[in-house]
Amino acid sequence: MPSPPRTPWNIVSLRPAGRHGALRAAARRHGGGLIALSSCRIEPVCDVTAQASLEAALGAAVVIFTSPEAVRAARARVSGSTIDSAVAVGSGTAAALRRLGIRGVISPARMDSEGLLDLPILQTVAGHAVGLVTAPGGRGRLQPALEARGARVVRADIYRRVPHAPSPRAVAALLEATAPGVVAVSSAEALQHVLQVLPAPAGERLRGMAAVAASKRLAETARAAGFEHIRVANGPRPAQLVAAVRTHPAR
């Protein structure tokens, strides 16, 4: 098999298996390559309990979708005729909702849990039901924060992240890369999991790279995980992460 073309720099993606395309394309537009170290795979939850919880969440006064994956998992039941409006954590989630015909989509400029909680619509939720369409483990701050404001959170876990160790080929690509690399950190859970399952030499190599974090909170997570050289991107979108990589001293 021929060797892959060499690139002047690489971005290391920790996104779920099969979800690296947008980041790879963004890197390629600026001459970079991508090393895919998937820490999990996405699996929809379609049992009776999940479907009942989704129906209940969609009937709440405010409905929050925490990721594009949540929208994909719910799309069989979600459309403009089902709900008039929804709250999205970020622009990718908002775009996914609009593609389903939902016109009243609200999303924060700061695309993380803190930005979401600053939205005016979530300041007066006391005594109201708030639907949270999400997955176990993600956006852990949202539910307690909303409940502290007096909301009754109706949670629907309709997909899950199944642990998925990086393949031997991906680990070899990390260890054998000669071009400088930067790790894209857009999920604390993904970073922590991949560091747990990587062989020690690969984990050491990863920590020796610079990191680009999608938020200040994730920058703190990366620093606690042993990364020394960290830059905070303007958001979690592939173009934003790559823009930060281009001005980051790759190692």
Image (spheres, rainbow, N blue to C red):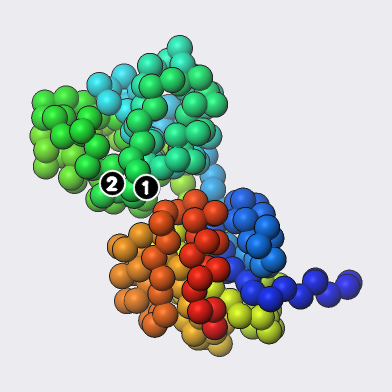
Q: Secondary structure at mark 1?
A: loop
Q: Are marks 1 and 2 in contact (CB under 8 Å)?
A: yes
Residue type at mark 1: give it: Met
Residue at image location 32% in from the left, 76% down from the top = 224
- In the displayed structure image, the side of residue 232 where residue 128 appears, left or right: left
Q: Nearer the viewer, residue 74 or 177?
A: 177
Q: Secondary structure at mark 2?
A: helix
In this rendering, is residue 67 above or below 206? Answer: above
**Residue 83 is drawn in which quadrant?**
top left
Residue at image location 41% in from the left, 56% down from the top = 234
| View extreme (right): residue | 1
CA gap, disc 1 to disc 2? 6 Å
* Percent x, y of residue 20: 62, 55
Residue 235 in sight in this render:
yes
Q: Which mark is residue 63?
A: none
* Percent x, y of residue 244: 49, 65
Labels in figure, total: 2
Q: Which mark is residue 111?
A: 1
* Percent x, y of residue 148: 11, 42
Residue at image location 49% in from the left, 85% down from the top = 208
- In the displayed structure image, the side of residue 179 where residue 146 appears, left or right: left
* Percent x, y of residue 126: 11, 30
Residue 16 in sight in this render:
no
Residue type at mark 2: give it: Gly
